[in-house]
Image (cartoon, rainbow, N blue to C red):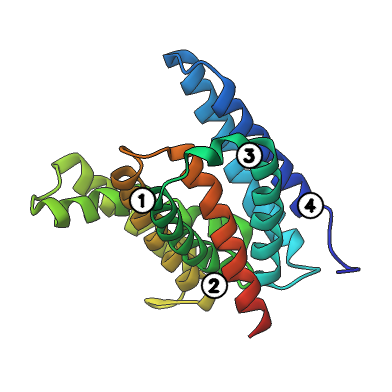
Amino acid sequence: LKRLSYFPYIQLGVMLLFLVIAYFALMSSKKAELLMVSVTLAWGSSYLLMKVGLNGIGPFNLIALRFGIAFVFMTLAFLPKFRKLTRATLLKGLLAGVILFLLFTGMVCGVNYTTASTAGFLTSTTVVLVPILESFLKRKLPEKSMVASICIAICGLFLLTATDGLALDKGALLCLMGALFYAIYIIVLDKIAKKEDAFLISIIQLGVASALGAVAMCL
């Protein structure tokens, strides 16, 4: 840990800041849009911060530290909310945490083998994967505009990451795995958070992801 860069802590601070803002802010339409823009900026910068952080520690160490610190701070800050914890909320938090760990395993391990810009682009294909997965679930073909978007994304994917014909390097494949799990995470969270305390589920998932990262770190 002596070589641990301070960049992961900056990233954690930014994440915590936006979580607190989201909790206390009155979610008017304009405020929600402004918050989404801010989160997008923080999310985009996270790939560079992860790349720098991985110079000092391993991927699973970073996952365990990142979510562990966030979990401790969020738990202490919103401890009274745990009085409303139910078995259903706990189970949903566990499920979200497992998927969160899997998606960040792909992202963090992937960015370790490729550039930050490539990792950011590949993970962004989540916006294409979400409607595709929803189409399978609903057994309905996607709209023409979505099909066109998918084609453009595939072309960009090939131009950016193909190194030998149609082959993709290890980092790109891991990032795509992360993008797939991220799409699954969005769909699952949309389903499970409607009838429960979404904020409490978010805190629990941080602890679960951190614990799984710590276990993987020791293997």
**Where 107 falls versus 128 (above or below)?**
below
Identify the residue under disc 1: 88
Q: In the image, residue 5 lies at what x, y percent?
A: 84, 59
At numbered mark 4, what does the secondary structure look like: helix, strand or loop? helix
Residue at 14% x, 42% y is 143
Residue at 54% x, 62% y is 104
The kind of residue on which mark 2 rests is Gly
Q: Earlier in the sequence, mark 4 or mark 1?
A: 4
Q: Earlier in the sequence, mark 2 or mark 1?
A: 1
Which quadrant of the figure contains the C terminus? Answer: bottom right
Of the numbered discs in the image, which one, if any, rests on residue 79?
Answer: 3
The kind of residue on which mark 3 rests is Leu
Local crowd size for mark 1, using a 10 Å CA cut-off: few (<14), some (14–19), many (≥20): few
Identify the residue under disc 4: 7
The kind of residue on which mark 4 rests is Phe
Q: Nearer the viewer, mark 2 or mark 4?
A: 4
Q: Earlier in the sequence, mark 2 or mark 3?
A: 3
Q: Earlier in the sequence, mark 3 or mark 1?
A: 3
Q: Nearer the viewer, mark 3 or mark 4?
A: 3
From this viewpoint, is residue 18 visible?
yes
Q: In the image, residue 180 lies at what x, y percent?
A: 37, 62
**3D distance between C-alphas at marks 3 and 1:** 18 Å
Q: Earlier in the sequence, mark 3 or mark 4?
A: 4
Residue at 47% x, 14% y is 30
